[in-house]
Amino acid sequence: MKISVDYDRCEGHGLCAARAPEVFQLNDDFELVHRFAGGTVPPELVADARAGVDSCPVAALRELT
Amino acid sequence: MPRRPDVPAYRPDLYSSQAVQDPYPHYANLRALEPVVWLPKHKVYAFPRYAECNSALLDDKTFISCDGVALNPVTNRLSGGTTLGSDGEEHARRRSLVAHRLTPRALRGMKDLVEGQADRVVEAAVRQRVVDGVDVAAALPAAVVPDFIGWPREGRDKLLDWGAATFDVLGPLNGQAVKAVPDGLGMMRFAHTVAKRRTVLPGSMGDDLLRAADEGKLSHAECPGLMIDYLVPSLDTTLSAIASALHLFATDPEQWQLLKSDPSLIPNAVNEVVRFESPLRAFSRKVVRDTEVAGVALPAGSRVLVLYASANRDALQWENPDTFDIRRDASRQLGFGHGTHGCAGQGLARLETQAMLRALTARVDRIRPAGTPEWARNNVIRRLRRLPLELVPA
């Protein structure tokens, strides 16, 4: 599973980070850090990652595969 | 518009005073029928379940807003020029003009101010002990939002009435909408005067807008509409969430104790309140190209009704949807909308509601009902009008 982040849309609401802290984090500037950017989310985190994607209130996160 | 023969119809009026007071049984009936249900009274296809609401909100190229999101053609014609009623680049341009001030990132600096204010509101309420929860809920948004938008001091006492009226005219053209027209126009007139006389507070969002117009990024004529765009949904809606939170915790002491014992549940509790009592019941969209939803062919030109408040109670999406439980993962609720048109002010709304819950958990031991709550009648907004409570100090 891969996730794309549309940084133009991301407003830093942090719901993904609350839902899947091992995949998404907000830095001190409320900018989203996607831990597996450019790579693949490990299988054991896929369920959390998907819930994180679903929680994005501005649809900035998309599941690619 | 010819009705599709394979779509069930639901005859009761979702905008009658009965349905507005108690909408959830109607939503349950709608969800039990089909994913797409024809409402003959309003000539609209309703989406009562989560999946279809979610997909429609994400597909803003098929389900457009620029022909209005109201249930009547009059408001839909008038709402050109607003962010709510625009699409694509036009929407992105309007939204970017002010929304950058509303992101959680931009609001970092306001956290202390909002939390301090919330604490003062709760302190005063606890001292009074027996209160109308609606007044308590109104105090923080009223103290924070008009300054933020830059609304001049005079005219503020009318803001709640004007806001409610503006939501009323976003429903069908029923008696409720007709009654609201003078107040809706009152708000528009005032916004025009504010923009013309430049009486906005310096450094505010409204000030930003007028400067952007001076720089040619938008026309001065657009400013009043954009101010209304951000002012109207910022008071009633947040008031609704805070009042519903008070009501839900008063009627469910176990959930209240849970929140008190673990304040880290507060952010999710806000999601659960907005899921359980969604402040905005529904908006419509126009279908701009032939499409298919859950096997139903919807022709271009149809109007659909996205029932946020019903999607948030859909048993296909939520376990025990009619149970208020702050431990469930409510983050994917649709109460703030979703996608491109997702509520631009949700960062501020979350900040305010969380601040109120934080102050309440710190200062209040128990919240007791002290009378019968009453719901306000509005075509779009669900909110309490009266909520007698006793706040037992901690």
Image: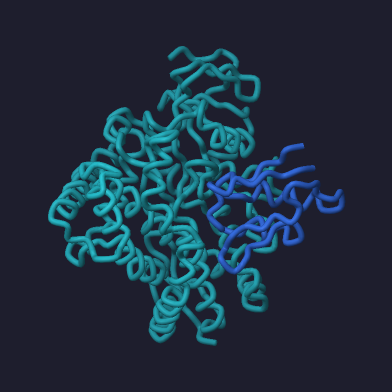
Residue that protrudes farthest toward the front in the picture: B215
Residue beneath the point at 31% across and 28% down: B73
In the rendered image, which quarter is residue B110 located in?
A: bottom left
What residue is rendered at 78% in x and 47% in y? A39
Measured from the top left, where is residue B154 in percent x and y?
Answer: 17, 65
Q: Nearer the viewer, residue A25 or B21?
A: A25
User: Is residue B314 shown left or right of residue B12?
Assistant: right
Task: Give the x, y percent position of residue A28.
Answer: 59, 69
Chain assigned blue: A
| Residue B2, placed above or below residue B332 | above
Quadrant location, the C terminus of chain B: bottom right
Q: Colour of chain B?
A: cyan
**B379 shown above or below B39:** below
Residue B288 in the image: x percent, y percent?
A: 46, 21
**Image vertical order of residue B77 relative to residue B257, above or below:** above
| Residue B117 place in picture, x, y as percent | 40, 77
Q: Is residue B84 left or right of residue B203?
A: right
Figure disc tally: 0
Is any part of residue A57 visible from this angle?
yes
Looking at the image, residue B244 sits to the left or right of residue A49; the answer is left
Q: How is the image coloured?
A: by chain
- Between residue B324 and residue B272, name the one nearer to us: B272
Looking at the image, residue B114 sits to the left or right of residue B185; the answer is right
Would you identify the image quadrant in which residue B271 lies?
bottom right
Which quarter of the image is occupied by the N terminus of chain B?
A: top left
Is residue B13 visible in the rendered image? The answer is: no
